[in-house]
Image: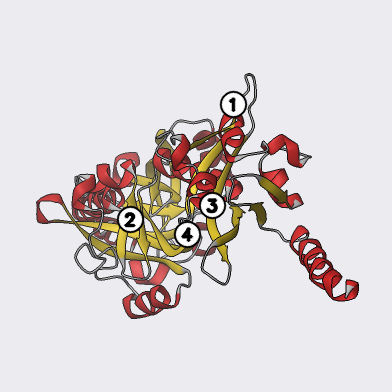
Amino acid sequence: MDTKQNKPDTGREQLQQLISHLVEGVLLIDPSGKITWANKAALAMHGCEQLAELGVTAAQYHKRFVLMYLNHHKLAARQYPVARAVSGEEFDDVRVELTLRRKNSDFRRVLVMRSVLFTGAHDEIEAVAIVIRDETEQVNAEGRFERAFAVNPAPAVVCRLSDTRYIKVNRGFLRMTGYSSDQVIDKSLYELDVLREAEYREQAIQSLQQGEPIAQQEAILRVQGGIDKFVIVAGQPIEVANEACMMFTFIDLDACKQAEESLKRSEEGFSKAFDLAPIPMMVCVEPVWRVIAVNAAFESVTGYRNEEIQGKTVVEIGLWEDAGILAGIRDELHEGSGIRNYEVPLRGADGIMLDTLISAEPVTINDDACVLCVFEDITDRKR
């Protein structure tokens, strides 16, 4: 008889030993509101070491701990999960911020609580359990992400993968596009298409659907006023509030495109002026002075054809009989200024030496350091 009576107690002790090692916290409360047991995880989540520190009853628990929702709304005593469970209410995933009521305490935890009711044969409540999950680190990480995301000057939006709707946007994206936050949040990726005319759009969409990184690629983004903007877009899978998302980041290419167009126009203008100039001109790439272009006047005076000498160095062509001439010109240029009317003999294509005055100036063409040389034929004058 005694053995049978001990079996339930033994089983309860074993169950408590098992629960005591759970990562989740567990509080046991009797119908009168007395807190009868807590595992180590539950104590640690409340900053306690002993059961008595929680308070003997639900009322004392309220006096020792302050609970607030994450919107900073403070809970009344009857709203405390412990009090709601004792009153027989079943609830899931109540997320609260817990702090100690005593002064000068910086203890803070974000806890998610749910109730479990144990009933007897006649549906009367015999005991109540509060199961607790600590989400402090996750909430702190989310907070750090929110702050970093908001102040990051690089334009970015976060798209939820389950329905491809935007759930976050930063100021950088709003400045780049001219949209307001309301014009972006909750819009579908297919309404505000950040992958529009992307280089590898199909592959990017497939990566989005599978939650995989999207490689950097050029795209055209439709911004406020129906204007098209050239961007580089990339996607990085992240998790926000336990939901799989994709964070898109952007580089505004408009300034680069405008600079490219301006440079192209400038180079086209330079090319036309170079070809039509009535005096001989030559462009060489430093440091070996490899010829990349000569104009029609240079061809006429020297007899060299552009296609014949293009890609060769001035030494290979044999423009100057004395190697010291090139060295002298280089020294003058390296001092930081161009040279003007430097008298040098120039060998023509037929081998005849021409008396010339050379002027040279460092220039940059297609990001290459070059030298623009202008020649004046003074052969007849010298004679």
Q: How far apart are marks 3 and 1 (CA)?
A: 19 Å
The image quarter containing residue 163 is: bottom left
Furthest residue to the left?
225
Q: What residue type is labelled 1?
A: Arg
Q: What element carries label 3?
A: strand
Residue at (40, 41) in percent of width and height: 150
Q: Which amino acid does label 2 sit on?
A: Ile
The residue beneath circle 3 is: 112
Instruction: Give the side of residue 8 with respect to residue 331, left or right.
Output: right
The residue beneath circle 4 is: 92
Q: Which of marks 1 and 4 is nearer the N terminus?
A: 4
Residue at (31, 53) in percent of width and height: 253
Residue at (66, 58) in percent of width and height: 24
Q: What element carries label 2?
A: strand
Mark 4 or mark 3, which is nearer to you? 4
**Residue 308's spot in the image, x, y percent?**
39, 71
Q: How far apart are marks 4 and 3 (CA)?
A: 9 Å
Please, is residue 225 above or below residue 80 in the view?
below
